[in-house]
Amino acid sequence: MGQQQLILVLLAIMVIGVAIAAGLGLFSSNQAGQNKLAIINDLNNLRAMAYKYRIRPSTMAGGAGSYEGFVLPGKFASNENANYTLNVTADEIVVTAASYVTPANTITVGIDSKGKFTDWTYTGDFQ
């Protein structure tokens, strides 16, 4: 082979390598984004359940105006999206969701006495 042909082969190999690396980078960032959206969806469902518990009277297994006594439903403790932990007080719940795919990616959010989200915090690839 001539020198020009060798240079073209090396150049083609480098271009293919760069394309593969770029594709892998795009795939991993898309995976983190999809995981983040799935966790936010779970948090929305959890927020609704917690607020329903708060406004339900104690005679109907509710909190009677308090979040105290609310526990994570079994399906939310850990699922294919994340592992969830709660810090419950009478007027607020702080939820921490650690990604099941990459535990360094977390979302921490509060649920106030009106059932609204407060103080979103993202770590890792979720920032």
Image (spheres, rainbow, N blue to C red):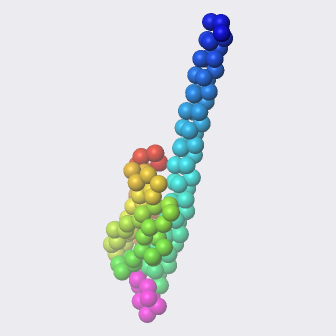
The correct choice, above or below, for 60 with respect to 93 in the image is below
Q: Looking at the image, which is closer to me, 100 or 5?
A: 5
Measured from the top left, where is residue 5 in percent x and y? 66, 11
The correct choice, above or below, for 46 with respect to 104 in the image is below
Measured from the top left, where is residue 89 in percent x and y? 33, 72
Q: Residue furthest front?
A: 1
Measured from the top left, where is residue 26 in percent x and y? 58, 39
- Main SS of the magenta part reads loop
Q: Residue furthest bottom?
A: 59
Measured from the top left, where is residue 37 in percent x and y? 55, 56
Q: In the image, what residue occupies the spot 47% across and 54% down?
A: 101
Q: Is residue 110 visible?
A: no
The correct choice, above or below, for 66 with respect to 21 in the image is below
Q: How many marks?
A: 0
Q: Is residue 9 visible?
A: yes
Q: Looking at the image, which is closer to me, 74 or 121?
A: 74
Quadrant location of the N terminus?
top right
The part of the chain drawn in magenta is 57-66
- Assess whether residue 84 is covered by the magenta stretch: no
- Compared across the picture, whether 59 is left or right of 36 comes to left
Q: In the image, what residue occupies the spot 54% across and 43% down?
A: 29
Q: In the image, what residue occupies the spot 47% across and 84% down?
A: 56
Q: In the image, what residue occupies the spot 45% across and 56% down?
A: 99
